Image: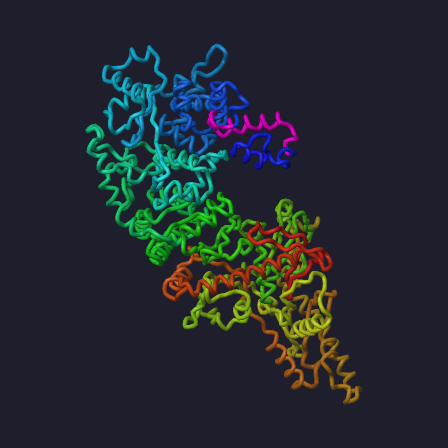
C-alpha cells in the first residue's frame, strides 16, 4: 500500500477530503479506499471506535475477530492496547493467544526462528517456551499419536496455565469475561475481589492481596494493564529474556525499535513523542510493552505516599531481573539464573534496575557525547566467549541500539574481567579480545569529556528514524558525536553538522569513491581498476601484470586478498555489483601500516621493523593529503601500503577529472618522465636465479623491466604438460642458465660489430643526445611492454656525461616505497597504539573543544563538496548532462569502468 494512502488513513481523512493525487493513486474509486481502510486497520491493530474503519465495517465484534486472526497469522504481538475489547469481549487472553500461535507453528513444522523477536520474548515470559523447549515439543509431536484425520495432538503437550509472571505494584488489575461456571471454581476471597472489580472498576495491583491477584490471573479471570502517562520517564537497562530471532517489519514493531534507540530517562514520554513526531498514544503503548516485558523500568513508580498503603503481601517481592529462570538458549540471554541475589549482582559489577533515579544519574543530566558503532562491534562482544555479562550488554547494544551512560558502569565492570584474561591468542579470538579491551579504555576517555557522560549508539538503529527525527534527536541529546572506525561498508554513516562529528563527514566517505578520490587528489595510490556491474573479465588486466596478489572490494562489502591467478572468480561478483581491483603485492601480499592522525610532530611513527621507520609528516603523500583533508582537527588513521613497487606519484596533478581526454602539454611531459623511468628504473625485487659471466661480458649489466609488465596468469595446460607453464618463461634454473648463455653470445656478437663501426665512425658522431641514448637502450616487445633494458659500458663512450644524466633522473624518479591505501575517520578499536594516540588527542590536544570543532565543521563542508563533485565527474563523459551527487544519499554505483594509474583517474580501455 502506498505510504501516502496509509498516512491519510492514520490521520482519519475521509474520501471527500482526500487530495486529488491520492485519489488518482486509488483509481478514483471510493470502494478501493474502503478496502484499504479495512486492510490497514486490521494489519495495524487500530481500535474500532474513533477510526475510519467504523464507517466501513458495521460489526464491531467481527472486526476484532479479524484483528486477532490476522495478528495470529502474522505472528504479531498480542494487542495489549485492545485488551479491554479482546479479553472482555472475545474471552481471548494473552496466554490463550500465544498457545494457539505456538500450536499452529508446530503443526506446520515451522522452526522457532519463525517467531519475531518481541513475540518470542512474550511467549517465553508467559509460556516458558524457548528454543530448546520448542525443539523438544516438536520432536514429541512428531513421535506422538495422531488424531483420526492425521493431525498432531499438539495442544496436550502445551502448558495449561500461564507461568507466574512478574507484576509491579503500580500495574492495574482489570476483570475479564467471567461466566457463571467460573464463579463456581473460585474461593470466597477471590469472589470478593472479582465483585470489587466489577463494582468499582480497575484497581491498583499493589493495593490488593498479591496471592489472590496471582491466582485469578493464572485462572484467566483477570488481566493486567500497564498504565503509562505522558509525564512518565523510563530507564532501559541491559536486556534479559530477549530472544534474537527475526524482525517482522510491521508498523508497531518498527516503532518499538525507534523508541528503543531514542528513549532517555531524562526525557518524558510526551517529549519523546514530540522529538519523533509520533502520536503520543502510540508511544505510550510501546513504553507500556517495554515495562510489561521487563525491558524498561518506570522511574518514580512508587512515591512515598503510595508505599504506606501498599498491601503487605507485596513487600520484599523479587525484582524482575533477579527472578531465577533457566537459560533457554545463548540468544535468550537471561543471566539471572547464576545470580540469585542482588548483593551478588552488585559485587560482580552488573547494573540492576532501580526503582528511582540515583543521585549520579540526576547529576549527569544534560547533553552527552555519543560514541557511534556498528554491528561488527556487538558481534565481536557476543561471539568472543569473553564473559556472559558482556554478552548481555552486547545484546542490548544491538537490539536496543543504545547503551546509556547509566549502564556503562556495568559494562566497564565486565570489560575489566576481560582485561585480566589471558591475552594470548591468534586470529578471530585475538580480535575479539583486542576490541573488548580497547573499548574499555575508549569509553573511559570519552565518558569524561562532558559532565553528562557518554551513550553508546548503534549507527544502524539511527537509520530506523527519518532524517528529520534523527537530526532533532541528536541535537537535543548530544553535544558531540564520535564514530568508531572502520565502519562496515554496509553501514550508512551519520552525516551531521550539528552536533559536530569526529568521524566521516558524509556517508560517501565510507564508500569506494573516497579511495579513488584521495588517489586522484594526491597523485598516489596502488594501481586500481573500478569495474561496473556486469563487466566480464577474460584475462588479467594489463595493469596488474607482474602482481601476484590483488585486493578485491565488492560494492558495500569488505575487501578480500586473492591471487592474481584467480582473477576469473571476480566475474561472479561482477554479476551483482561493481568491484574495485587493486594491486596488492609482487611476490608476497603487501605490508600495511596504520598512521593515526592528528599527527604528533614530536613523535615519529615507527613500524615494528626499524628499517621501515618513517617520518610521516615529511612524506609526500601526507603533504598532498593535507591540502584536501583536515588532518589537524579531525581524527582517524591512514592505511599505508608497500606493494613491492615504488609509487612514482603524479607531478602534474589536476583536481578535475576529465574522462577520456588529457591536455597535450601535460601528456608530453608525462611521456618524457615515463621514458626516463623506462631507461633508469629497475625493479629491486626481481633477480635472475643465477647470472653467468664471461671475461668479455663481465661489464655487461642486465636490468629487469618494471615488474608490472610480467604476466603472472599462466596459459592453459597442454597435452604434454598437465600443469600450466608460467607465461614469463622462467620455469626452472636450467632454463634461466640457457637464456643467459644465449644473451651472452648475442652480446659478444654485438660488441664485435660495434667495435668495427666505432673505429670507422668520425669523432663528432660520438656526441649522443638524450633521444638517441633512449633509442639505443630500449628493446620493446610491444607498444607497452619493455621486456629487457640492456646497458653496456662498451656501448657508451662519454661515460661521465651518461652517468650524470642517469643520476639526475634517478633522483627525480625514485618514488615512494609506501603509498596510501585508505583513509578512515574516527576512533579505531583494533589497534592499541592508534587508539591511544587518537584518544589522547581528543582528551588532551583540544579536538573536543569548540574552536577545533568549528574548524572541523568548515573543513568537512569543503571536503564534502569536493568529494561529491569528484563522484559526479567520474560518472559522465565530457558533453554529457551531469547530475550532481546529493549529499547524504547512498553512494551511487559507477556508470563507467575507471582506472587509476600514473596518478590519475581515467576511463579503462578494456585491456
Specify the segment rendered in magenta: 25-51
Which residue is pictured at 47% across the width and 50% down the height?
Answer: 471
| Rendering coords of residue 607 (x, y %) | 45, 66
In-front residue for pair 832/143: 832
- Res 82 → quadrant: top left
Q: Is residue 113 above or below residue 503?
A: above
Which residue is pictured at 34% across the width and 39% down the height?
Answer: 232
The residue lying furthest to the bottom in this view is 763
- Res 675 → quadrant: bottom right
Magenta stretch holds residue 835 = no
Q: Is residue 248 left or right of residue 395?
A: right
Residue 382 visible within the image: no
Which residue is pictured at 53% across the width and 48% down the height?
Answer: 490
| Rendering coords of residue 77 (x, y %) | 43, 29
Magenta stretch holds residue 33 = yes
| Rendering coords of residue 291 (x, y %) | 35, 35
Q: Is residue 331 above or below residue 376?
A: above
Q: Is residue 848 above or below residue 236?
A: below
Residue 387 visible within the image: yes
In-front residue for pair 422/453: 453
Q: Is residue 566 left or right of residue 171?
A: right
| Rendering coords of residue 841 (x, y %) | 40, 64
The residue lying furthest to the front in this view is 16
Q: Is residue 685 left or right of residue 797?
A: left
Amino acid at each position: 500500500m502506498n505510504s501516502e494512502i496509509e498516512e491519510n488513513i492514520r490521520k482519519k481523512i475521509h474520501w471527500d477530503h482526500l487530495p486529488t493525487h491520492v485519489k488518482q493513486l486509488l483509481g478514483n474509486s471510493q470502494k478501493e479506499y474502503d478496502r484499504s481502510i479495512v486492510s490497514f486497520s486490521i494489519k495495524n491493530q487500530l481500535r474500532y471506535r474513533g477510526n475510519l474503519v467504523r464507517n466501513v465495517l458495521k460489526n464491531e465484534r467481527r472486526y476484532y475477530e479479524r484483528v486477532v486472526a490476522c495478528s495470529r497469522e502474522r505472528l504479531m504481538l498480542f494487542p495489549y492496547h485492545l485488551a479491554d475489547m479482546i479479553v472482555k469481549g472475545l474471552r481471548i487472553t494473552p496466554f490463550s493467544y500465544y498457545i494457539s500461535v505456538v500450536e499452529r507453528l508446530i503443526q506446520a513444522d515451522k522452526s522457532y526462528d519463525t517467531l519475531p523477536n518481541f513475540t518470542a520474548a512474550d511467549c517465553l515470559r508467559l509460556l516458558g517456551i524457548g528454543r530448546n523447549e520448542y525443539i523438544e515439543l516438536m520432536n514429541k509431536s512428531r513421535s506422538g499419536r495422531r488424531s483420526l484425520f492425521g493431525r498432531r495432538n499438539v495442544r496436550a503437550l502445551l502448558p495449561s496455565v500461564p507461568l507466574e509472571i512478574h507484576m509491579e505494584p503500580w500495574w492495574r488489575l482489570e476483570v475479564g469475561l467471567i461466566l457463571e461456571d467460573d464463579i463456581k471454581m473460585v474461593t470466597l476471597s477471590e469472589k470478593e475481589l472479582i465483585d470489587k472489580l466489577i463494582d468499582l472498576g480497575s484497581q491498583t495491583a499493589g493495593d490488593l492481596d498479591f496471592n489472590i491477584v496471582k491466582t485469578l490471573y493464572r485462572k484467566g479471570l483477570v488481566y493486567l494493564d500497564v498504565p503509562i502517562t505522558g509525564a512518565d520517564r523510563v530507564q532501559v537497562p541491559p536486556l534479559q529474556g530477549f530472544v534474537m530471532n527475526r524482525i517482522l517489519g510491521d508498523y508497531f514493531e518498527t516503532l518499538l525499535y525507534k523508541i528503543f534507540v531514542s528513549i532517555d530517562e531524562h526525557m518524558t514520554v510526551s517529549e519523546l513523542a514530540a522529538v519523533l513526531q509520533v502520536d503520543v498514544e502510540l508511544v505510550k503503548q510501546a513504553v507500556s510493552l517495554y515495562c510489561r516485558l521487563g525491558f524498561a523500568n518506570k522511574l518514580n513508580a512508587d512515591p512515598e505516599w503510595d508505599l504506606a498503603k501498599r498491601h503487605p503481601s507485596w513487600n520484599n517481592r523479587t525484582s524482575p531481573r533477579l527472578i531465577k529462570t533457566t537459560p533457554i538458549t545463548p540468544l535468550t540471554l537471561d543471566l539471572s539464573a547464576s545470580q540469585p541475589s542482588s548483593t551478588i549482582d552488585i559485587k560482580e559489577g552488573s547494573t540492576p534496575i532501580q526503582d528511582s533515579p540515583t543521585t549520579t544519574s540526576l547529576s549527569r543530566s544534560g547533553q552527552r557525547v555519543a560514541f557511534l558503532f556498528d554491528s561488527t562491534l556487538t558481534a565481536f562482544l557476543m561471539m568472543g566467549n569473553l564473559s556472559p555479562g558482556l554478552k548481555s550488554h552486547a545484546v542490548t547494544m544491538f537490539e536496543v541500539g543504545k547503551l546509556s551512560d547509566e549502564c556503562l558502569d556495568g559494562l566497564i565492570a565486565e570489560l575489566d574481567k576481560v582485561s585480566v584474561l589471558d591475552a594470548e591468542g591468534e586470529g578471530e579470538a585475538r580480535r575479539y579480545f583486542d576490541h573488548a579491551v580497547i573499548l574499555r579504555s575508549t569509553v573511559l576517555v570519552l565518558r569524561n569529556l562532558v559532565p553528562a557522560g557518554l551513550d553508546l549508539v548503534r549507527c544502524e538503529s539511527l537509520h530506523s528514524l527519518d532524517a528529520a527525527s534523527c537530526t532533532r534527536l541528536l541535537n537535543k541529546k548530544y553535544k558531540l558525536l564520535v564514530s568508531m572506525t572502520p565502519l562496515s561498508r554496509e553501514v550508512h554513516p551519520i552525516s551531521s553538522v550539528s552536533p559536530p562529528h569526529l568521524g566521516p563527514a558524509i556517508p560517501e566517505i565510507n564508500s569506494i569513491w573516497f579511495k579513488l578520490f584521495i588517489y586522484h587528489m594526491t597523485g598516489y595510490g596502488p594501481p586500481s581498476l573500478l569495474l561496473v556491474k556486469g563487466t566480464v573479465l577474460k584475462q588479467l588486466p594489463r595493469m596488474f601484470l607482474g602482481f601476484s596478489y590483488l585486493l578485491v572490494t565488492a560494492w558495500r562489502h569488505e575487501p578480500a586478498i586473492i591471487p592474481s591467478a584467480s582473477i576469473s572468480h571476480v566475474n561472479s561478483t561482477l554479476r551483482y555489483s561493481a568491484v574495485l581491483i587493486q594491486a596488492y603485492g609482487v611476490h608476497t601480499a603487501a605490508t600495511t601500516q596504520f598512521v593515526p592522525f592528528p599527527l604528533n610532530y614530536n613523535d615519529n611513527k615507527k613500524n615494528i621493523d626499524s628499517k621501515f621507520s618513517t617520518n610521516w609528516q615529511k612524506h609526500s603523500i601526507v603533504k598532498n593529503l593535507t591540502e584536501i583533508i583536515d588532518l589537524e582537527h579531525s581524527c582517524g588513521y591512514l592505511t599505508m601500503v608497500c606493494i613491492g613497487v615504488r609509487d612514482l606519484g603524479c607531478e602534474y596533478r589536476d583536481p578535475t577529472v576529465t574522462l577520456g581526454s588529457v591536455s597535450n602539454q601535460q601528456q608530453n611531459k608525462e611521456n618524457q618522465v615515463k621514458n626516463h623511468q623506462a631507461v633508469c628504473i629497475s625493479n629491486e625485487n626481481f633477480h635472475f636465479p643465477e647470472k653467468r659471466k664471461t671475461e668479455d661480458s663481465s661489464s655487461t649489466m642486465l636490468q629487469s623491466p618494471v615488474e608490472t609488465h610480467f604476466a603472472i596468469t599462466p596459459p592453459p595446460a597442454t597435452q604434454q604438460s598437465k600443469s600450466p607453464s608460467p607465461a614469463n618463461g622462467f620455469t626452472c634454473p636450467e632454463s634461466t642458465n640457457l637464456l643467459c648463455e644465449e644473451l651472452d653470445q648475442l652480446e659478444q656478437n654485438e660488441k664485435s660489430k660495434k667495435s668495427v663501426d666505432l673505429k670507422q665512425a668520425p669523432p663528432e658522431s660520438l656526441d649522443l643526445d638524450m633521444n638517441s641514448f633512449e633509442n639505443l637502450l630500449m628493446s620493446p616487445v610491444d607498444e607497452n611492454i619493455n621486456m629487457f633494458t640492456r646497458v653496456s659500458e662498451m656501448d657508451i663512450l662519454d661515460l661521465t656525461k651518461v652517468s650524470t644524466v642517469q643520476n639526475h633522473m634517478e633522483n627525480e624518479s625514485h618514488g615512494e616505497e609506501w603509498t596510501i591505501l585508505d583513509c578512515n575517520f574516527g576512533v579505531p578499536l583494533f589497534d592499541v597504539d592508534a587508539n591511544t594516540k587518537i584518544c589522547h588527542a581528543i582528551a588532551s590536544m583540544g579536538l573536543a573543544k569548540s574552536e577545533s570543532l568549528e574548524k572541523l565543521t568548515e573543513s568537512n563542508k569543503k571536503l564534502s563538496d569536493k568529494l561529491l563533485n569528484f563522484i559526479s565527474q567520474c560518472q559522465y563523459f565530457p558533453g554529457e548532462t551531469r547530475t550532481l551527487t546529493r549529499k547524504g544519499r547512498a553512494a551511487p554505483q559507477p556508470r563507467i569502468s575507471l582506472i587509476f594509474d600514473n596518478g590519475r583517474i581515467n576511463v579503462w580501455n578494456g585491456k
